[in-house]
């Protein structure tokens, strides 16, 4: 990312190409699944230059204000790692009464 932010031509080409395909993937996935918002998480998306490139491609490929549905996740890495466990604990101990009655 340092080279990208410094304007390295080869790295910029590579990551801009990545942003182009990522934009197409996001649009296609949204078309299939359809949800209220699209939440992105990761170092790639938090890089301002990459995110700008991604949004630029989305605006190019998608009419309307589709890009406004994209949200960067406010969760930290540790919170993301814990979230599946929290869902399992909630289901096992609070939603499934039969297990608690054993």
Image: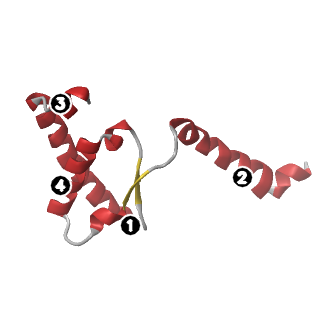
Numbered circle sitting on residue 60: none
Please tell me whether mark 1 sits on a helix, a strand or a loop: loop
Residue drawn 67% across the image and 45% down it: 86
Q: Quadrant of residue 83?
A: top right
Q: Are marks 1 and 3 in contact (CB under 8 Å)?
A: no
Please name the residue that numbered disc 3 is placed on: 6
Q: Are marks 1 and 4 in contact (CB under 8 Å)?
A: no
User: Circle 4 is placed at which residue position?
Assistant: 57
Q: Nearer the viewer, mark 1 or mark 4?
A: 4
CA distance separating discs 1 and 2:
26 Å
Asked if the residues shown at circle 3 and circle 4 are in contact, with their CB atoms under 8 angstroms apart, the answer is no
Q: Looking at the image, which residue sits at the far front?
A: 6
Q: Give the mark toward the camera: 4 or 2.
A: 4
Rounded to the nearest whole Å, what is the CA distance between mark 1 and mark 3?
36 Å
Where residue 39 sits: x, y (%)?
42, 54
| Residue 19, percent from left and from top | 21, 45
Q: Which residue is mark 1?
A: 34
Observer-nearest of 69 and 23: 69
Earlier along the polypeptide chain: callout 4 or callout 2?
4
Vertical arrangement, residue 1 with respect to residue 38, above or below = above
Cα separation between marks 1 and 4: 19 Å
Q: Are marks 4 and 2 in contact (CB under 8 Å)?
A: no
Residue 91's disc is 2
First in sequence: mark 1 vs mark 2? 1
Question: Residues under labels 2 and 3: Cα distance?
Answer: 47 Å
Q: Nearer the viewer, residue 28 or 2?
A: 2
Q: Position of residue 71 (x, y in %)?
A: 39, 56
């Amino acid at each position: 990312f340092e080279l990208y932010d410094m304007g390295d031509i080869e790295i910029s080409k590579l990551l801009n190409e990545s942003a182009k395909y990522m934009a197409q993937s996001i649009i296609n996935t949204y078309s299939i699944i359809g949800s209220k918002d699209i939440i992105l998480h990761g170092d790639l998306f938090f890089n301002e230059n990459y995110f700008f490139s991604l949004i630029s491609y989305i605006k190019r490929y998608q009419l309307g204000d589709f890009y406004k549905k994209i949200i960067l996740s406010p969760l930290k890495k540790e919170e993301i790692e814990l979230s599946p466990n929290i869902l399992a604990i909630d289901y096992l101990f609070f939603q499934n009464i039969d297990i608690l009655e054993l």
